Image: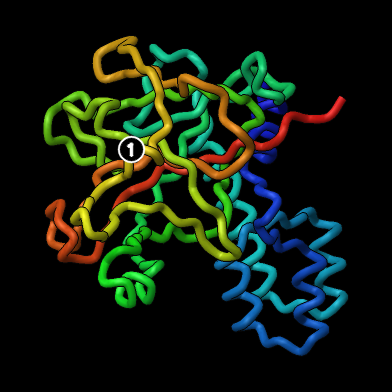
């Protein structure tokens, strides 16, 4: 069981587009002449998969890797173990879970050969905005629309599934006003979330959240961009959420609490939102 959970976590947390730093990468940077400060900084900023067995540490030492770099590699490897323990939870929806949004993986149809577990989705703060169609908007006097998009960091979600109709569980804090890391106090319900497809770019993902044109301006997720999902309450503060139609492969997210920089819902400030992101991968062949 434990072996299955570890393998499942590694599989779900390995988007194809993400760079993973390994022992070989550290040696390559050292051979290229990078100093310890650069290698350590890169280690701390990267997804890592280091082999820190005694044999490998001795081999790295013999190849000139310094003690500070070795310590940074050990710290990163230990952090990976802790993080895996934090994101994997029992598949039983009635078992206690910290507040957050979870994806059920390993279930029938999920395409993962392991016992079902829940993966706690990352919550990403998207607080940058960009506009498209601005020149056409100005040249046509507003006939052509200008679209404002919120930018989500990174080009791919950490956690992925091959299930076309993935199942999610929302756990909110039991007491009204309780602060949590995910910002989900008591009283939060599924209708406060919007499920949308994220447009993936080279180093980011984008969400259209506002438009301007002759017919006025609109703020918030456009109706055409929303993906319908159903939900039901399975316990106090626990909701099951499922897309009503199969999802095509791609990047997705549940948007929560779309605001401007002043905390309102207007277009006057810097738009921001929190996104619980995930990705759907093509079904395994064979």
**Along the line of sight, which residue is nearer the eye, 220 or 256?**
220
In the displayed structure, 126 sits above or below 4; it is below
Q: Which residue sits at x=78%, y=64%?
A: 23
Query: Image quadrant for the C terminus?
Result: top right
* Badge 1 element: helix
- Indicate left or right for 145 with 60 as reference: left
The image position of residue 145, as x and y in percent, is 33, 61
In the displayed structure, 55 sits above or below 116; it is below
In the displayed structure, 253 sits above or below 2; it is below
- Indicate left or right for 241 with 154 as reference: left
Q: Which residue sits at x=62%, y=25%?
A: 163
Q: How many marks?
A: 1
- Indicate left or right for 52 with 182 as reference: right
Query: Image quadrant for the N terminus?
Result: top right
Residue 148 in view in this figure: no
Instruction: Give the crowd class for mark 1: few <14, some 14-19, many >=20 residues within 10 Å.
Output: few
**Along the line of sight, which residue is nearer the eye, 40 or 255?**
255
The residue tagged 1 is: 223
Q: Quarter of the image holding residue 224? A: top left
The image position of residue 242, as x and y in percent, is 45, 21
Residue 212 in view in this figure: yes
**Along the line of sight, which residue is nearer the eye, 139 or 116?**
139
For the rendered model, the colour scheme is rainbow
Q: Which residue sits at x=72%, y=28%?
A: 3
Q: Quarter of the image holding residue 43? A: bottom right
The image position of residue 122, as x and y in percent, is 45, 44
The image position of residue 180, as x and y in percent, is 26, 40
- Indicate left or right for 255 with 204 as reference: left
């Amino acid at each position: 069981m434990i072996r299955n959970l570890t393998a499942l976590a590694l599989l779900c947390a390995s988007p194809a587009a993400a760079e993973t730093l390994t022992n070989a990468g550290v040696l390559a940077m050292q051979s290229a002449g990078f100093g310890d400060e650069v290698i350590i900084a890169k280690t701390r900023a990267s997804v890592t998969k280091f082999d820190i067995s005694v044999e490998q540490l001795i081999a790295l030492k013999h190849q000139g890797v310094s003690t500070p770099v070795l310590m940074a590699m050990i710290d990163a490897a230990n952090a990976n173990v802790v993080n895996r323990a934090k994101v994997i939870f029992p598949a039983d929806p009635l078992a206690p879970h910290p507040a957050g949004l979870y994806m059920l993986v390993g279930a029938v149809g999920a395409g993962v050969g392991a016992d079902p577990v829940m993966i706690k989705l990352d919550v990403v703060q998207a607080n940058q905005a960009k506009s498209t169609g601005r020149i056409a908007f100005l040249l046509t006097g507003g006939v052509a629309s200008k679209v404002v998009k919120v930018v989500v960091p990174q080009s791919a979600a950490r956690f992925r599934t091959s299930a076309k109709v993935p199942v999610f569980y929302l756990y909110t804090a039991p007491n009204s006003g309780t602060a949590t890391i995910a910002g989900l106090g008591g009283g939060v319900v599924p209708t406060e979330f919007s499920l949308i497809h994220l447009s993936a770019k080279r180093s980011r993902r984008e969400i259209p959240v506002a438009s301007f044109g002759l017919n006025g301006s609109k703020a918030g997720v456009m109706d055409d961009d929303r993906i319908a999902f159903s939900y039901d309450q399975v316990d106090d503060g626990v909701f099951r959420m499922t897309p009503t139609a199969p999802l095509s492969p791609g990047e997705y997210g549940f948007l929560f609490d779309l605001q401007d920089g002043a905390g309102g819902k207007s277009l006057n400030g810097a738009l921001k939102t929190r996104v619980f992101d995930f990705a759907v991968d093509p079904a395994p062949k064979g």
